[in-house]
Image (spheres, helix red, strand yellow):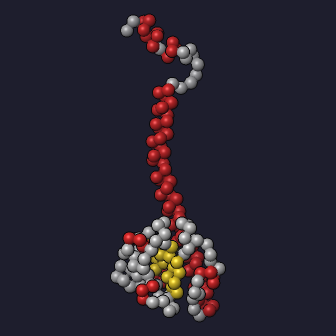
Amino acid sequence: MPPFLLKALSPLSRGRRGRPGFTLLEFLMVLALIGVLLAIALPAYGSYKERMKVSDAIRDIGLIAAKLSLYGMENRGYPDTLARIGWTQPDPWGNPYQYLSMEGATVGEKRKDRSLHPLNSDFDLYSMGPDGRSVPPLTAKASQDDIIRANDGAFIGKASDY
């Protein structure tokens, strides 16, 4: 290339004249890099938030179960509602915790495992999970994301893990 053409195409001859700053291409590359980083970070953050909600529900169910057990020992039976033990807080997804005392419950009301055996002999306690839906057998799709208490409190976790 002739020297005059090289000088005309150099960054200093195109109006920059030694001023600091970014070219449009550099700016677009930075924007693209930020976009790639966000595309990686946002799904990871979303799954982190969901795991924290599951952990909160597990903690709450353990606390509610302890209060119910204490109530059961003091009163020789479990309450009709969670309000009787002073629990009115919703689950992490904004839905009420589901509770059923086994005293007087029908077979159809009780939560059931894969073999269709009741999960608990004392009381059922669970969160309907992120979708806010649930049906008694754990094998149903609507119940897979529920956070449950099973084996009379020996298991508290996601229904899909039980």
Q: Is residue 34 visible?
A: yes
Vertical placement of residue 123 versus 13, above or below: below
Vertical placement of residue 35 versus 145, above or below: above
Q: Position of residue 111 (x, y in %)?
A: 44, 81
Q: Write down the quadrant of residue 1 in the picture.
A: top left
Q: Residue furthest right?
A: 86
Vertical placement of residue 94 versus 108, above or below: above
Q: Position of residue 60 (x, y in %)?
A: 57, 73
Q: Position of residue 109 (x, y in %)?
A: 45, 85
Q: Is residue 22 left or right of residue 36?
A: right
Q: Position of residue 150 (x, y in %)?
A: 46, 80
Considering the image in quadrants, where does the C terminus appear? bottom left
Vertical placement of residue 22 versus 78, above or below: above
Residue placed at 39% from the left, 79% from the top? 137
Residue placed at 42% from the left, 6% from the top? 3
Q: How many marks?
A: 0
Q: Is residue 156 visible?
A: no
Q: Is residue 8 left or right of residue 77?
A: left
Residue placed at 57% from the left, 92% from the top? 77
Residue placed at 50% from the left, 58% from the top? 48
